[in-house]
Image: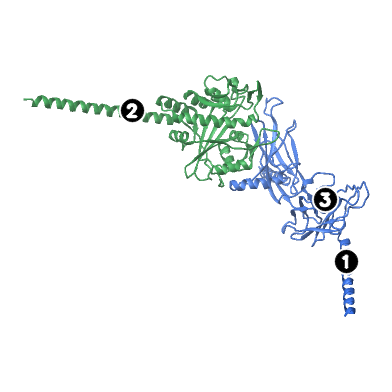
């Protein structure tokens, strides 16, 4: 007579299995709830800015602006290195990147010099950096009126977010042709070649306008140093997005998302998921060539500027 | 209370007159400065001046801090391909002397005033060109509102010829025989045929047709390789208007000059309605011009003589033949 004990064991086993399933379901639900809350919280941390999109070339275009606002400096940064918000009022566009997805799918990323002369729809001219100072909308309108570049989405990154993102990735690897320095931006890279740099040095590199390189035993100004920063910006952007998309550690990704959300300004149509996809697909970066206006900082669009833009799909009128 | 309508009326009148005054000089007020272009309209090939006020450093900025005014032409965009083409074409109207397609830059004085003159290229197409300016302080800026420069083509009763490679030069243009030179002709009657000849022995080099709307020509001329080295003149004659322009040139790289004249004749623009040639000569050598063209006269006489000799020989041969029979 083994019936009753077998049935009892069977019932106990089913009961344990049911408990396990319930526990697993509870844990999964809890994890999903935490994840959901996390996403909501992270999304809520994004600051939104209002602008009116412009229309033109088919596809979707993102305008990514590196702002030089002194309002939110990197943690631990000396105010004297940057100047106070009173000394350096407002915010200029230090970096201007365009990411464009054509209807066919391929993405192109363009880095535009901050000193490029542009005009808005009212015919007022300005350097790109200063066009942003008047308002983000003025920058959007100027890119449209001068270069036929429409803007569907706008992302503004300040100094603090920039360094925090790089630091969250435990630094990024860049390759430089020679040791570089710039006392004004705080840049100090002691060796040539590939090297891992932290957020502060990455920021100093993209802000460097008076870069000196150590060649043949002496420090010498880099030719066209002011325009070189456009290339540095592209270099940092590519390194950051590549590293961010290659990272699988959920804690690092969580910290990255948390840091990004702290000071990133985006339009209302942009979510964290969009940003992740942007980083995933941004692809190779192209410096947009321009002509230096003799005797000054400003640069002017050239035929090569427009051929590069046309190759990226910007060959329709923008409004 | 009766004063109120009167005050309003005065204010309106003053506003209107201020706007009119600004419009007359092509001036527009922006922030606390003004930006203007004078004169406008301007005839292609002549100068105009951009001027502005109010470009000062920020309060507290050091005296040597960057401060510049950039003046640039606004190119209406209409597709990326056309933008480049438009800019290339349109910047011809905004070129500084010497010709350049870059934006202009000028440093304002201590009061914030500035001005910069440009030569509107003679081959600028007629129409309205929009220019803008910005007071650039490196870290901040004040953009001016744009002004419009109207470019007109020379439609007066006299013609001009400009050799583009020699603009601004005060010496006689030196042309290499066999090489093409771009020139612009202004002031001809629309659509008329313009004949180009080289002297002293007139040789017609080419015929051109003036623009059907504005009467200008933008083309190339080539002095034949057979032209003797030395001083020559080019004449451009409107076949309808009879307007004529005489341009003194020196030819090099042609055939050997028959004389050692070293004339350095200056050019020339003339009225043509009366067909008087106002060429100014400052010859420093023997005053005669080098002969041009081929020695066709001598060759012709030589040919005629040979032909006559041939005919005579033929006749003599026939008579001998008849006598023999």
Which residue position holds label 2? A31
Q: Secondary structure at mark 2?
A: helix
Q: Which of the two residues, B278 or B203, is positioned nearer the viewer here? A: B203
The reply to whether the C-beta atoms of the residues labelled 2 and 1 are less than 8 Å apart is no
Whole-Å distance between the Cαs marked 3 and 2? Answer: 93 Å
Q: Nearer the viewer, mark 3 or mark 2?
A: 3
Whole-Å distance between the Cαs marked 3 and 1? Answer: 30 Å
Chain to which the residue tagged by mark 2 belongs:
A
Chain letter, colour blue in render: B
Q: Earlier in the sequence, mark 3 or mark 1?
A: 3
Whole-Å distance between the Cαs marked 2 and 1? Answer: 116 Å
Colour applied to chain A = green
Q: Is residue A76 visible?
A: yes
Q: Residue at x 12, y 27 (%)?
A: A7
Would you place residue B21 above or below residue A159 in this image? below
Which residue position holds label 3? B254
Q: Secondary structure at mark 3?
A: loop
Percent position of residue A77, x then y: 55, 20
Which residue position holds label 1? B306
Q: Say which mark, if any, is on residue A284.
A: none
The reply to whether the C-beta atoms of the residues labelled 3 and 2 are less than 8 Å apart is no
């Amino acid at each position: 007579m083994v019936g009753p004990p077998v049935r009892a064991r069977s019932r106990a086993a089913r009961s344990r299995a049911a408990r396990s399933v319930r526990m697993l379901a509870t844990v999964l639900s809890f994890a999903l709830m935490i994840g959901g809350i996390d996403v909501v919280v992270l999304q809520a941390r994004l600051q939104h800015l209002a602008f009116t999109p412009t229309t033109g070339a088919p596809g979707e275009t993102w305008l990514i602006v590196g702002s030089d606002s002194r309002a939110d400096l990197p943690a631990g940064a000396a105010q004297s290195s940057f100047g106070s918000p009173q000394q350096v009022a407002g915010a200029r566009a230090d970096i201007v990147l365009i990411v464009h997805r054509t209807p066919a799918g391929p993405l192109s990323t363009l880095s535009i010099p901050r000193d490029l002369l542009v005009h808005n729809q009212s015919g007022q001219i300005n350097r790109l950096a200063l066009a942003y100072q008047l308002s983000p909308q003025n920058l959007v309108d100027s890119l449209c009126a001068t270069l036929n570049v429409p803007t569907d989405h706008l992302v503004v990154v300040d100094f603090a977010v920039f360094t925090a993102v790089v630091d969250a990735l435990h630094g990024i690897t860049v390759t430089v042709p020679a040791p570089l320095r710039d006392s004004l931006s705080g840049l100090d890279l002691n060796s040539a070649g590939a090297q891992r740099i932290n957020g502060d040095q990455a920021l100093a590199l993209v802000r460097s306008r008076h870069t000196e390189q150590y060649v043949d035993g002496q420090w010498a100004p880099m030719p066209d140093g002011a325009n070189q920063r456009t290339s540095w910006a592209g270099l940092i952007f590519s390194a950051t997005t590549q590293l961010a998309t290659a990272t699988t550690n959920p804690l690092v990704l969580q910290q990255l998302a948390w840091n990004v959300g702290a000071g990133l300004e985006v339009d209302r149509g942009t979510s964290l998921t969009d940003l992740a996809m942007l980083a995933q697909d941004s692809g190779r970066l192209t410096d947009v060539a321009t002509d230096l206006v003799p005797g000054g900082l400003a640069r002017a669009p050239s035929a090569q500027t427009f051929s590069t833009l046309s190759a990226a799909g910007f060959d329709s009128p923008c409004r | 209370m009766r004063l109120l309508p009167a005050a309003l009326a005065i204010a309106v009148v003053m506003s209107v007159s201020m706007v009119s005054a600004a419009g007359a000089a092509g001036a527009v007020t922006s922030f606390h400065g003004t930006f203007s272009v004078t004169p406008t309209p301007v005839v292609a090939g002549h100068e105009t001046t951009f001027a502005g006020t109010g470009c000062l450093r920020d309060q507290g900025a050091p005296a040597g801090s960057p401060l510049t005014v950039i003046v640039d032409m606004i190119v209406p965009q209409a597709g990326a391909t056309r933008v480049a083409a438009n800019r290339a074409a349109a910047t011809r109207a905004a070129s500084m002397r010497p010709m350049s397609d870059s934006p202009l830059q000028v440093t304002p004085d201590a009061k914030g005033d500035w001005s910069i003159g440009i030569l509107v290229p003679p081959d600028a197409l007629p129409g309205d060109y929009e220019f803008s300016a910005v007071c650039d302080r490196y870290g901040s800026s004040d953009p001016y509102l744009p002004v419009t420069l109207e470019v007109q083509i020379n439609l007066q009763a006299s013609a001009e010829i400009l050799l583009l490679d020699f603009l601004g030069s005060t010496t006689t243009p030196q042309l290499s025989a066999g090489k093409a030179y771009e020139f612009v002709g202004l002031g001809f009657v629309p659509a008329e045929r313009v004949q180009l000849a080289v002297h002293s022995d007139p040789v017609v080099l080419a015929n051109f047709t003036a623009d059907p709307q504005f009467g200008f020509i933008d083309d190339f001329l080539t002095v034949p390789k057979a032209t003797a080295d030395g001083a020559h003149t080019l004449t451009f004659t409107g076949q309808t208007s009879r307007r004529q322009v005489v341009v003194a040139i020196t030819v090099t790289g042609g055939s050997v000059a028959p004389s050692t004249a070293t004339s350095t004749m200056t050019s020339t623009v003339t009225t043509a309605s009366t067909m008087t040639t106002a060429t100014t000569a400052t010859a420093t050598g023997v005053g005669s011009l080098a002969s041009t063209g081929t020695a066709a006269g001598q060759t012709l006489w030589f040919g005629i003589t040979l032909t006559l000799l041939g005919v005579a020989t033929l006749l003599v041969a026939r008579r001998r033949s008849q006598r023999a029979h």
